[in-house]
Image (cartoon, rainbow, N blue to C red):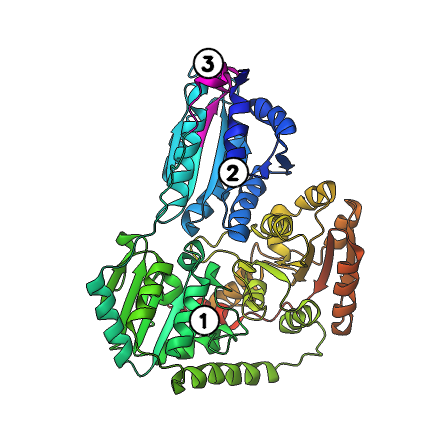
Amino acid sequence: MAKLHGGQLVVKALQREGVKYIFSLSGGHLLRIYDATIDAGIRIIDTRHEQAAGHMAEGWSLATGEMGVCAVTAGPGLTDAVTAVANAKMSNSPMLVLGGRSALFENDIGALQDLDQMALMTPITKWAAKCHEAKRIPEYISMAYRHAMSGRPGPAYLELPFDVLSQEVEESDVPFPENYRPKYRAAGQPEAIEEAAGLLAKAERPLIICGAGGLWANAGEALTAFAEKTGIPVMTRSYGNGLMPDSNPLTITGTLMATMGPMSQADVILLLGSRINFSMMYGRFFPPGVKIIQVDIEPTELGINRGPDVGIHGDIRVVLEQLTQAVPATPDRAWGADTTKMVQEVTEMTLGAIDMDSVPIHPQRLVCDIREVVGGEGVYVCDGGDIHLFGVETFPAERPGSLLATGLAFGCLGVGMPFALAQKLANPDRTVILLSGDGTFGLNGMEFDTAVRHGIPIVCVIGNDQAWGMIKHGQEAMFGSDRVLGCELGPVRYDLMVQGLGGHGEFVERPEDIKPAVERAIASGKPACVNVLTDPTIPHPVSVMAADMMGAY
């Protein structure tokens, strides 16, 4: 058999995993990998910043359920990717980070871009290792996949020194592991299932809350089947959005403030793969006396901040299938229909009180118009502060991964452009809309160049309030409008920047112009930016509540 160098072994191992794309920014330490992809048919999507490459890898995982892969060069290439890796760790998203490194014989003697990268990556990954021998590269890649994709997912880091990538070995001497990931999922203990089923059977106002754990368990069908058998309303959140379609009558959809109502009224909550963190006020938002059934693939998550009445360690999909068998059929439960109707009525009343024709444009008018143009078949990504909250509560989620946003755990801005690009690569036949704040757009806005070069026609709509709006409104609430500092940006013409990079750009100042501009952007077939001036005085109600809480400290 032929001799293969380490870079070819990397690509061959990734081929066996069905990898289509490697998200990357070129660097000398990666040259062996880059060259090997040409013959293997794996496409390099080269970005303008390693942070974007990392976010694209996570975005691919969220869009497809497959492992996203990014490759970054040594030193500053690796440090540039740290934010993206940390975001994936906090969001429990699987991704593989291939890190270049100076040759082993050059370590610790002053080589170019030499750094103790393992010390950086170990705390922000689920698994991190360095390969010292070329023929073991496929073995290490199999380890990375096993760690990243099993149990509670997370990012894996594999460091590949340049001399290891350059080393040649006989292909026949290289072991390629087989069957290295578990085939079967963990079920809940029968006693716990029985206890949980008993609580749910007695409940008068039960509620299901499903988070990202349901996405990685591929639990959509099981969640829908359980909800429809029991008539229990479902609230999906974070990367759990779309596991049960918003169009299902039992899915709770509406403004974020309106959806808090069912949570405050429930007597039993079935919490599926969702943390009891700050977004749930550490459990203090739950009503007194409520019973919590918490299900998670990670046993150490059970009991954080609020001990469950029934804690079930197991795979979300398998546990839901167990519960479906164990509970009686109550599909006509009045509480379910009444709850979704109540949330819809509160939402309609809230929206009805807004002057949708005001100038400057109300951000709610912007997101409603986008939804009307694109509809339920679109894919939506929301990035920013206030504007992202308006988007998340308005855009439909009809499929898993079809509504992504700034993660609840890390609150990382800048994910929007990379997530949207990954979504379009994964869903080439669907319209992909990125709703971005003007502040967050600046973090990875140059990835429009990546979109143009690689022909990835996403549509970015900027809600331009000329500021880091959430921070500005927080300063105004806490200190007064005369003490605003460091958060005002001005009416920047991002649309002209996108035009200059070869995309389609439009500038909108009046509400009646939103829909035509979005329609033209979609029809252009190019990466497009619709830059919309929105009312700088309007915060999202959740931001107001958060500012009040901070001011009370």
Vertical position of residue 353 compared to residue 237: above or below: below
Q: CA distance from mark 2 to mark 3?
A: 23 Å
Q: Which amino acid is tagged 2? A: Ala
Which mark sits nearer the N-terminus, 2 or 1?
Answer: 2
Q: Position of residue 133 (x, y in %)?
A: 42, 18
Residue 264 falls in image quadrant: bottom left
User: In the rendered image, which residue does mark 3 sit on?
Assistant: 106
Q: Check residue 170 for magenta coloring.
A: yes
Image: magenta residue range: 158-176
Horizontal relation, residue 44 to residue 12: left or right? right
Q: Position of residue 183 (x, y in %)?
A: 37, 46
* Disc 1 to disc 3: CB gap under 8 Å: no
Q: Is residue 548 visible?
A: no
Which mark sits nearer the N-terminus, 2 or 3?
Answer: 2
Question: In the drawing, what numbered circle is on residue 81?
Answer: 2
Q: Which amino acid is tagged 3? A: Glu
**In the structure shown, which secondary structural element does the residue marked by tag 2 occupy?**
loop
**In the structure shown, which secondary structural element does the residue marked by tag 3 occupy?**
helix
Q: Which amino acid is tagged 1? A: Met
Q: Nearer the viewer, residue 58 or 504?
A: 58
User: In the rendered image, which residue does mark 1 sit on?
Assistant: 545
Q: Position of residue 531 (x, y in %)?
A: 72, 59
Vertical position of residue 184 compared to residue 96: above or below: below
Q: Nearer the viewer, residue 283 or 400?
A: 400
